[in-house]
Amino acid sequence: MKNNFLTSVCALVLCMSFNTYAKENTTSLSNVITEAQQEDTESLYNLGYMYEQGLGVAENFDEAIKWYKKAASKENAHAQYHLGLIYTKGVGVTQNIKYAQEYFIKACDNGYAKGCEMYRASNENNI
C-alpha cells in the first residue's frame, strides 16, 4: 500500500513533466543530440527525457537511463530526480527504493524542491 502511494505520486509527476516539456520544447532533435554529444548538461537531460517519453524518438528506457545518468553525474538535478522516479517505479530497471532515495536527495541537494518532496515522501511511507 505504501509503495503504491509513491508510485501514484511518481506517475502524476511524470504526466505533469511531460505536459510542461511538450509545451516548452522548440529545439530540434538533431540540435539536442549534437549538444548532448558535446556534454551539454541540459541537453543530456533533455535527450534522456525524449527517450523516456518517446518525443521525436522511439521510447527507449535504456537510452533514457543512459542519458539521465550522464546528466546526473554532472549534477543536473532534473536528471537526478527523474532517475529517482524511474527507480521508484522500476521502469526499465529493477525497482530499488534505496537508489531512488539517493537520486532524490541528490536532486534536493542541487536545489530541486521536487527531489526534496519525493525524498520526504519515501521516508514518511517507510519504503
Image: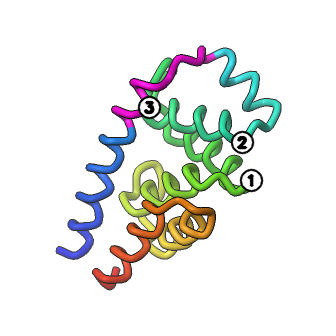
Circle 1 SS class: loop
Q: In this view, does 75 lie above or below 98?
A: above
Q: Is residue 93 left or right of residue 77?
A: left
Q: Is residue 6 above or below residue 124?
A: above
Tags 1 and 2 in contact by the CB under 8 Å rule? yes
Q: Per the image, is 71 magenta?
A: no
Among the two numbered marks 3 and 1 on one chain, the one whose residue lies closer to the N terminus = 3
Q: Name the residue under label 2.
A: 41
Q: Please name the residue shown 51% across and 32% down the image.
A: 51
Q: Mark 3 points at which residue?
A: 21
Q: Which amino acid does label 2 sit on?
A: Thr
Circle 2 SS class: helix
Q: Please name the residue shown 22% across and 67% down the image.
A: 5
Q: Mark 1 points at which residue?
A: 74
- Percent position (x, y) of residue 113? 47, 62
Q: What residue type is labelled 1?
A: Lys
Query: Which segment did they paint magenta?
Result: 18-29
Q: What residue type is labelled 3?
A: Tyr
- Percent position (x, y) of residue 107? 56, 62
- Percent position (x, y) of residue 80? 57, 57
